Amino acid sequence: MENIIINGGRPLYGNVTINGMKNAALPVICACILNEEPCIIDNIPPVSDIEILLDILVSMGASVQRLSKTSVEINCKHIIPCSSTNEMAVKLRGSSYLLGAEFGRFGKASVFSPGGCSIGARPLDLHMKGFEALGATCGFKGGRIEVESERGPIGSSIYFDKVSVGATANMILASVLADGVTVIENAAREPHIVDLAVFLNACGANITGAGTSVIKVKGVEKLHGCRYAIIPDMIEAGTFMAAVAATSGKVTVKNVIPKHLEAVSAKLEEAGATVIVGDDYITVESNGKLKGVSIVTQPYPGFATDMQPQFSAMLCFAEGTSDVVENIFNSRFLFTDELNKMGANIKVDGNHAVIRGGAALSGAPLFCHDLRAGAAMVIAALASEGESTISGIDKIERGYYDIVGKFEKLGANIQKKEVKTDEQSYTSLSV
């Protein structure tokens, strides 16, 4: 196993290039199941979640050919529905998209309850409600979610009681080949929902309204292959932007869509950083004199829950008090115990955290509970004096490609170190 070792206190300078968006690539890869022709997907991030999903498709009978580290050709013509294994599906949350894709093409789907990060309840009740509206019978058997309809999906009107990215994506997947028209109301507006719709339309689907709260899908008879590039990862970009503000320095974040980062940019400027926006880049500069701000996580275009831990870490180094309200997930403040071990002053009450910044943080042994929490710990360690050791970094590598190498090129003193199993166990227990 490996740990990340960081000796903090160094400002960051230079340029960093952002990879494709994991949360966009996962549903797009599953969407290939709907297609009997091969598709080439470019700009996929070479992270573990993507590798696991590709392995799942191969195990189901798909042909997956690597063209480069970030490009893959997928042919699902001979894929066998309902054949994903429990052991593989439980490794990532993105396996839930197999439900919509399998049901959309074959009229039946079966997937073991998805895994992913432990950040709070993420029930699939909205997904089930949507599948039932499309004519399916849904249930659980042996820990697997089963969706089936003898007639296949039938176009319908679906209204979500609350915004759900996963449920919105699954309903798009399920209705692309449906008989009739499907209208999804109170739909998620996230960029990765738009990316999924654009990809499917490039394959011959008829989807309108993606990016708004009402999405209309007119079912088509079949899809055709295409070549498509995944959008840049706004969460990876925002993570580097927050790290620059916390550590001071000046970094240009390249290969981004600035509009996707408007909420992040606005909060950084409010906190006292300088943000310069270009066509496909954002430069962040900070003199280290940050001030506290208030953050409330909301569905897009609000402040993303996936950026909350990173900003919470950054705000530990800001003067004054910051209020952070987490409205999306009910267990997303677990990482604050780790930051408090470094000397931070964070008090959590339910979904509300009060961060009293300005104290000097020092390095400590840290354990990563989930993907974005791990990124928050990296930021805190980079901005603190002394050495920090972060264990459980497989969580970080689920969504960040070469995070150590990228920060090292910006001037950070950061490295990965292999540790023995007994040493790793001691580190985890000691935190």
Image (cartoon, rainbow, N blue to C red):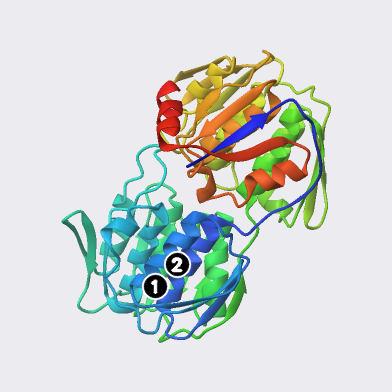
- Residue 276, by quadrant, is top right
Residue at (47% x, 86% y) in the render: 37
Residue at (54% x, 76% y) in the render: 201
- Residue 80, by quadrant, is bottom left
Whether residue 172 is visible here, answered yes or no, is no
Q: For mark 1, what is the residue?
A: 58
Disc 1 residue type (three-letter): Val
Taking the image as shown, residue 243 lies to the left or right of residue 278, namely left
Q: For mark 2, what is the residue?
A: 54
- Residue 107, by quadrant, is bottom left
Q: Is residue 397 above or below residue 173?
A: above
Could you classify mark 2 by the number of other residues whose Cα lies within 10 Å: few (under 14), some (14-19), or many (20 or more)?
A: many
Disc 2 residue type (three-letter): Leu
The local secondary structure at tag 1 comes to helix
Find the residue positioned furthest to the left.
141
Taking the image as shown, residue 118 lies to the left or right of residue 67, namely left
Which of these two is toward me, 408 or 124?
408
Q: Is residue 122 above or below residue 48?
A: above
Could you classify mark 1 by the number of other residues whose Cα lies within 10 Å: few (under 14), some (14-19), or many (20 or more)?
A: some
Residue at (16% x, 56% y) in the render: 142
